[in-house]
Image (spheres, coloured by chain):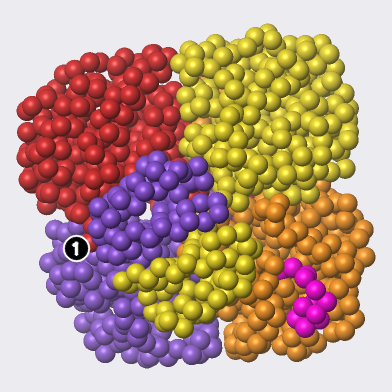
Chain colours: A purple, B red, C yellow, D orange
Amino acid sequence: MIVIMKRSAIEKDVQSISKKIEAIGFQSHIIRGEERTVIGAIGTGDKERVKILINQDGVDRIYPISKPYKLAARSTKEEDTVIQVNDIQIGGGVFVVFAGPCSVESREQVLTTSEGIKSGGGHFFRGGAFKPRTSPYSFQGMGEDGLKLLADARTQTGLPIITELMSIDTVDLISQYSDIIQIGARNMQNFSLLKAMGSTQRPIFLKRGLCATLEELLMSAEYIMSEGNYNVMLCERGIRTYEKAYRNTLDLNAVPTLKQMTHLPIIVDPAHGTGRVDLVTPMAKAAIAAGADGIMVEVHPKPEEAFSDGQQSFTIPQFKQMMDELKPFIEAAGKRLVIV
Amino acid sequence: MIVIMKRSAIEKDVQSISKKIEAIGFQSHIIRGEERTVIGAIGTGDKERVKILINQDGVDRIYPISKPYKLAARSTKEEDTVIQVNDIQIGGGVFVVFAGPCSVESREQVLTTSEGIKSGGGHFFRGGAFKPRTSPYSFQGMGEDGLKLLADARTQTGLPIITELMSIDTVDLISQYSDIIQIGARNMQNFSLLKAMGSTQRPIFLKRGLCATLEELLMSAEYIMSEGNYNVMLCERGIRTYEKAYRNTLDLNAVPTLKQMTHLPIIVDPAHGTGRVDLVTPMAKAAIAAGADGIMVEVHPKPEEAFSDGQQSFTIPQFKQMMDELKPFIEAAGKRLVIV
Amino acid sequence: MIVIMKRSAIEKDVQSISKKIEAIGFQSHIIRGEERTVIGAIGTGDKERVKILINQDGVDRIYPISKPYKLAARSTKEEDTVIQVNDIQIGGGVFVVFAGPCSVESREQVLTTSEGIKSGGGHFFRGGAFKPRTSPYSFQGMGEDGLKLLADARTQTGLPIITELMSIDTVDLISQYSDIIQIGARNMQNFSLLKAMGSTQRPIFLKRGLCATLEELLMSAEYIMSEGNYNVMLCERGIRTYEKAYRNTLDLNAVPTLKQMTHLPIIVDPAHGTGRVDLVTPMAKAAIAAGADGIMVEVHPKPEEAFSDGQQSFTIPQFKQMMDELKPFIEAAGKRLVIV
Amino acid sequence: MIVIMKRSAIEKDVQSISKKIEAIGFQSHIIRGEERTVIGAIGTGDKERVKILINQDGVDRIYPISKPYKLAARSTKEEDTVIQVNDIQIGGGVFVVFAGPCSVESREQVLTTSEGIKSGGGHFFRGGAFKPRTSPYSFQGMGEDGLKLLADARTQTGLPIITELMSIDTVDLISQYSDIIQIGARNMQNFSLLKAMGSTQRPIFLKRGLCATLEELLMSAEYIMSEGNYNVMLCERGIRTYEKAYRNTLDLNAVPTLKQMTHLPIIVDPAHGTGRVDLVTPMAKAAIAAGADGIMVEVHPKPEEAFSDGQQSFTIPQFKQMMDELKPFIEAAGKRLVIV
């Protein structure tokens, strides 16, 4: 930590802070400038207790030196993490597509959509059986019946499935059915859930919270990794801003920035990142160009009858159209699109 | 719902939307203006399915008519909800103070602080036994041992206790010890947790999420209330903005606005709402003036040794000083400060 | 400036940065920690050129040491600035009220409102003659005719006037009529205008931009002060956030924070800070409690006929009602309300 | 406008609002639902005066029907606007690159950079002679001497020039030298300046404000167009959010959204949109993929010696490298890159 003293700080303040820093277990380095004094707290003591010095006489600001995530950091592991799910690899030069309906609604819906996604070139079939809904009066998902339908779809098409887990009391249930477990934006800092994810064997698809910083996203990945599960991929899905023209503001700056900060695969969700079906294809292209390892989109046989998120869902033909349009961009980005 | 057609919409589009609205179960009212046509979808059909019409030809925007929360709405229940905890009333013209350390750390810390808060005029003793921490490497709380210390403090001072619940597997445990259950900002949309809160008998202290709208906050209260627990109080604790001079931006506009939207008591947390101990007292005063029913603040015998949030914690003398300074504002606001 | 090196930085990187820092004219202090090296750039060289080192090998982050504003800083001048306008003092323990219509619309409107404000206890009469409007098709103000009406109101009631200046080609014109010149939120970083304000003799009422940081607000004050005009007051008027329940989010944290950062008087505008007339009085009370030196509100004889901002304007009786309600809070805050 | 009545509104309220709507000059259409009544205000009256009805008894919310911009709207003019500058066309399937240093600093800097941009394939040479700087103590630009150097660069390379205009007293001066006039983000709502731009003959490059909505950006374009200058291009340059990992958050959702809202060309500035030179190339690619008509980037012979924005400036070889990397994306997007 670095402690910047106020211009009005007196020698007594400087000495007092220096002693407190050493009492906490750091080495203290005093640098005296013309206008201000700066004190470095170097070493591996308890940073929380340095932060609190902000309330001491003469202290103006305190800055961190080291970053709080370790296992997720690129500096810890230089090469890209590649997550293998059945035959499909996520990360490492391959581009993958996660697609399916927001909610599992019926056998026919699931099977039709899954077939459409398979034939359109998608790699993972997504569908929600337990749904996080802002309103308690909205459709809450089919629960285990929905999971069974997802498994049936997998049997039929061979596409591995991904579904959202919302509560620790369904960890066993969902792990039994789903190839990848999704943690939604609203649970990105549900720390109990993150810890539970650390002890499953399933890869985790972790969505960025609505106003989470990239550092917080990595700290949440760190929660999972520090419990032993290193198969984490991160998903940028739009942040909340003042702009009302779209549901969220897709933050593509996050893609190349995360690529520097971490070795984990980065996926982009342009459906939630825009909330408008007409923006999904252009923003999927932009995500590829920014360096994403994959995208997640919503597909429904009849979006106008969807129980949720219909306004941002493709029809099956629209999905295939998007896949065709993405190809030249995937190629321009030097990524491979594997056919399953 | 109200559907605003594009200026370029043709008669066929208007007829098509009108028919779809009726197919969904609403009545359709067409209003033809000089520039645009507007279609009202009136009645009690499935609003989700009207929203999806946004992707149909000729549709420009869709606005809601009705609000999605009912039980929490002022229009459903005009008189203020008053929550009774032992002898103390929350809401209804009384001003209450929740105070205590961020984390329970030791018997001595808890008993000393609790005594200080009692003698300073506070009403509820707060302390975290299970802590939501951004980093997995930070202190995570003392768990049940911490709850026991809180109970001991209650025995000694008589102050009811409030502590945070982070996970559904601790509902029984925490309900056994705590008079009020706090749901933290990061769990405001942890819907599984909210539902579980609906079936406890404990009053719920629900904090606004870091970037939650007031409507979302009320929807989260609605989750709890729709499961049968009507004793919910809401807490404004600062939102995340671009401003870096403080940890969060305390949104006091929320106080009079929520007072119009809902009958539930409104508490303000100026400690998290600023993140700086030197801002807590002025913002506590401002909260009172804006109409809050109470405040929550952090108090620690030695903030510089606190395991968490020391930079925004009062010492016990500072807490008493604040209480003295608040009195003229509580009086100006026409609220009563009850001595327990 | 403080340069934090990456964990992966090698000795060559450290030496290279150290040399560059000295070439720019700073002294370089190297602190070697267990994990990282930190280099302090101490002295008074060109900070811009240190910032650019961010792109050099091995550099992770760069933090500033000193603050960029000087004349506006509390550390430069400890005692509060008091601005004298005729008999009225702004700052220094006095509480002042700026009130009047958003736009000057007619002689009768101006004279009626001005009389109402005088008799209600207001101190300054505000009214816009040149209006910044989002749409080119909205009413743009009466121009010089409006200024003449303001002057007539001053003659009649004795209240000094304040009006907004939008363009450097009206500096002479507006200076001739107005006692205080207002710079609106949208012009807070119109640097040409700020410089021009530095050479007028009129006090300046500088509004915070819609998403300006407090530091930027002080830098804009610094522009005016560095050209010779030290009579600057600052106005918090709400910032833009994601919350849609109000037009803007009034940031009252800014009040006690600015009081620490600067010696300039701080005014709050709860009309623009909320955009809703029903929120103005509670937020005016909150502003007082937070430590503001004054408020600015909108008053119109018939808000429902106002050319602009009617939704946030008081009627004259509502203004008087607010003034009565504010008194106990002004007293609680230890401020004086002078009767003119 | 559409007026949504409260659930508690009584018949008298409904009748009163309906009459007021007609008094303002609109037709009033009452739709009675089970829960609420909705009143449409149809026609071409004064919308400002309908908005104010929000404060009347029984009124809950008011929504707009029509959009406030006309000349800039895609619905007014379906085909893309193409702006011709000398031989170069902006918009209409062509991709253009604006590049150059943040500030004009010296003859050598300007000529060297301009040559580098020409040979790298750029189309317009940018450079600031009058600089908007947050601090009055930062370099403010070379003024007219800088404009002369830009003109010399044009003579040498043939590249048309673009420079920022900050103040109406330099309109003639800058129009005399510059082929395109840039209005910076901080002046996006400097309405006096926008009006002045309406009467120049130069194309205008209008940057989105730091927290401007797309609708406000279009309204600012409308200011220029309504005064007679239809040659306006819009530039997304990043918005201000809570995320601190980058200087701004580039909002690429804006690109396909603006393409629907307006016929004007859309340019993206990934240098300001990220503030970090290492993010410029990936985000330039993403901008192309999202559908931009061009990009603006910063280039300096020695960024580490730049007077401003060095941390986001390319060297000349880096610029050429970026141009090479962009080509496959420009091709994938179906745009033409013209060689000048």
Pick the front one: A210 or B336: B336
Whether the magenta-drawn stretch holds residue A103 is answered as no
Query: For the magenta stretch, what is the residue range?
Result: D102-113
Query: Compared with residue A98, is residue B274 higher up or lower down, i.e. above or below?
Result: above
Left or right position of B165 against D242: left
Pick the front one: B110 or D82: B110
Q: Position of residue C215 (x, y in %)?
A: 58, 47
Q: Position of residue D181 (x, y in %)?
A: 82, 64
Where residue C309 sits, quadrant-wise, is: top right
- In the picture, which quadrant includes the C terminus of chain D? bottom right
Kind of element beneath mark 1: helix
Pick the front one: A192 or D118: D118
Q: Position of residue A144 (x, y in %)?
A: 17, 64
Question: Amino acid under label 1?
Answer: Lys
Whether the magenta-drawn stretch holds residue D110 is answered as yes
* Mark 1 burial class by Cα count in 10 Å: few <14, some 14-19, many 20+: many
Which residue bears the numbered disc 1? Answer: A195
Q: Is residue D92 visible?
A: no
